[in-house]
Amino acid sequence: MDHRLFRSLAVATALSFGLGALGAAPAPKAKTRIELKDGWYYLDGHKFLLNAIGYEPGARPGQDPKVQQPSDLPLMERDLKLIKAAGFNGVRTWKEMPESELQLVQKSGLKIVFGIWLAPDEDFADPKIVEKNLDLIKRVMAYTHKYDCVVTYLVMNEPMPEHMHKVGAQATVDLWKKSVELIHQLHPGIPVTISNNVDVAEFVDMNTFDVYARNAYDYKDGHNFTHGFSGAMRMVTESFGGTKPAILTEFGRSVSRAEWHAFYGGNTLQAQADSLVKYYRDILDSGATGLCPFYFADGWWKGGEPSIHNDAPEEWFGYFGFKDAKDQAGYPRPVWHALTQYNKALVVSPKNQQFYQNEVPLEIFAQPDVKKLKVIHQDGVLLEAAPSARGTFEGKLSFAGEGLKDRELVFEFYDAKGTLLKVESVVLLTGKDPIQWPTLELRTPATTLENTQSITLDVQVKNDGPFVLSPTLRYSFSHHKGWESAEDHTAILDPKLKDQTFTTSYTVPDRSLVLALYAGTDIRYGKFVKTLYAHKYLYRGHWADPIRVK
């Protein structure tokens, strides 16, 4: 995850115990068929929106998931029931889950994004390390291949640029490819990826993998500062140039009292709840088709003292908290209730910041208790319908022949008794003719960081149309030095000018292996707001050629 203090993430290798008393179902004979197409998961031929909460068994107060310990299967079964009741359809883990626990996931009906902990800080060029990692995969596949609850494998979490440079980008890619090939051989049909933190390594080409997976935290710097969280996530996916599913494998807010970085800790409980709901909307707007919010319960172990709840951001991301070291059940925070309500129906289409010509496509994934939905515009009901038996709805709203117009569509969802379960709005733009958007472009004479002490950056903005341009230009330099924040700046634009260029310069830090240049500004048409953005990468020499986005 994108955090500055405590980097260790693991889940216990926990000892396995018999499940007879829990009545666990045997491994299924018929496997779920997984297909990846058009940016989506399809399970047995049906489109599947992954909503898998981060979950760490063996990380309660007093426990350290890095140390082997018995699995608390009754407590885990209780957790999985709560997770399913809250509208999630899966869990995401970091380290390999033992078979006894995987059986409980299978029994629960939830899916799992299954973590395999290939340490991100080892020497990937060492044949012994490679062999050790592949042996771990073989041991895990010996039992996981029996379970159709596994929908994706995550084989590494947050490799750092400095380490990939040190051990070699080619050696890093080679290990990834060998891992993917081995898993495809031992568990055919299951996608494989890594959790790549895009705050430090968004330049890594994820086409090595089956799925574009990323950890992303909106700390308002770098590409989040210039593009907005939704735009930044869309930008990352677009840079890969493919049509694979994009899933956010971590995102969240810490409610620790201490704040170490903008929004990294120091959030109120209500701010956490409000932020997570907004992140869901932003992520769906970005085009991602998988969400793994971070995460189910606080991790007291991350400060190095599992029996003490230290006031460090890493220990306070949970949606369940614990009143003391003896409390193992925990208590739900406001964010849990907020996401339970939000999960009632996820509106995938339409999206904010989007233009639709003539027709607006509707696509919704609803919980079983949602029996009716309404779409309201300008205080009138445009559509009233019922989800399918699978909880999905697809349809269209036609505005054929109408001119350019901003529209705020309100979505309401009701149960069988007519009780309102959820309401949400989306602001979009419609019109009969294609849009000629304003443009924002980045230019720099620099082509490399090698022997480069400073660079000049030009940002050109053109706006010759019906949109109102923001007077604020946001630009940022992300020097990719560990977890250091990007340098963020603003400049003044003249909304009346049709063509203008802002010029600035930047001194490149000596240790910067990658420099990302970002810029963004907003345009408005009535209530409709869209962010224009652009980005560019510069590298120190050719070290990143085997691994970088081309």
Image (cartoon, helix red, strand yellow):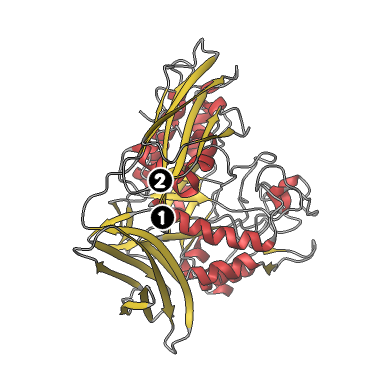
Residue closest to the eye, 48 or 187: 48
Q: What element carries label 2?
A: helix
Q: What element carries label 1?
A: helix
Tell me which residue sits at (57%, 71%) in the image.
82
Residue closest to the eye, 381 or 157: 381
The answer to whether marks 2 and 1 mark residues whose Cβ atoms lie closer than 8 Å is yes
Label 2, residues with CA under 10 Å away: few <14, some 14-19, many ≥20? many
Tell me which residue sits at (37%, 61%) in the image.
348
Q: Provide residue 539's location: percent of width, then percent of height.
A: 47, 21
Position of 206 compared to 36: left or right? right
Q: Quadrant of residue 77?
A: bottom right
Tell me which residue sits at (28%, 63%) in the image.
361
Is residue 71 visible to the viewer in this orientation of the structure? no
Up the image or down, 411 lies above or below 44; here it is: below
Q: Provide residue 514's location: percent of width, then percent of height.
A: 50, 24
Q: In which quarter of the image is residue 385?
A: bottom left
Q: Which residue lies furthest to the bottom in this view?
A: 417
Three-letter residue code for mark 2 = Arg
Label 1, residues with CA under 10 Å away: few <14, some 14-19, many ≥20? many
Is residue 105 visible to the viewer in this orientation of the structure? yes
Q: Residue furthest left?
A: 401
Residue beneath disc 2: 234
Instruction: Return the mark for residue 468.
Output: none
Q: Provide residue 40's location: percent of width, then percent of height.
A: 33, 54
Up the image or down, 151 lies above or below 502; here it is: below
Up the image or down, 193 lies above or below 363; here it is: above
What separation in Å lies between label 2 and label 1 (alpha carbons)? 8 Å
Residue beneath disc 1: 285
Position of 188 compared to 159: left or right? left
Quick one: label 2 or label 1, which is nearer the N terminus?
Answer: 2
Q: Provide residue 515's location: percent of width, then percent of height.
A: 51, 25
Tell me which residue sits at (39%, 55%) in the image.
289
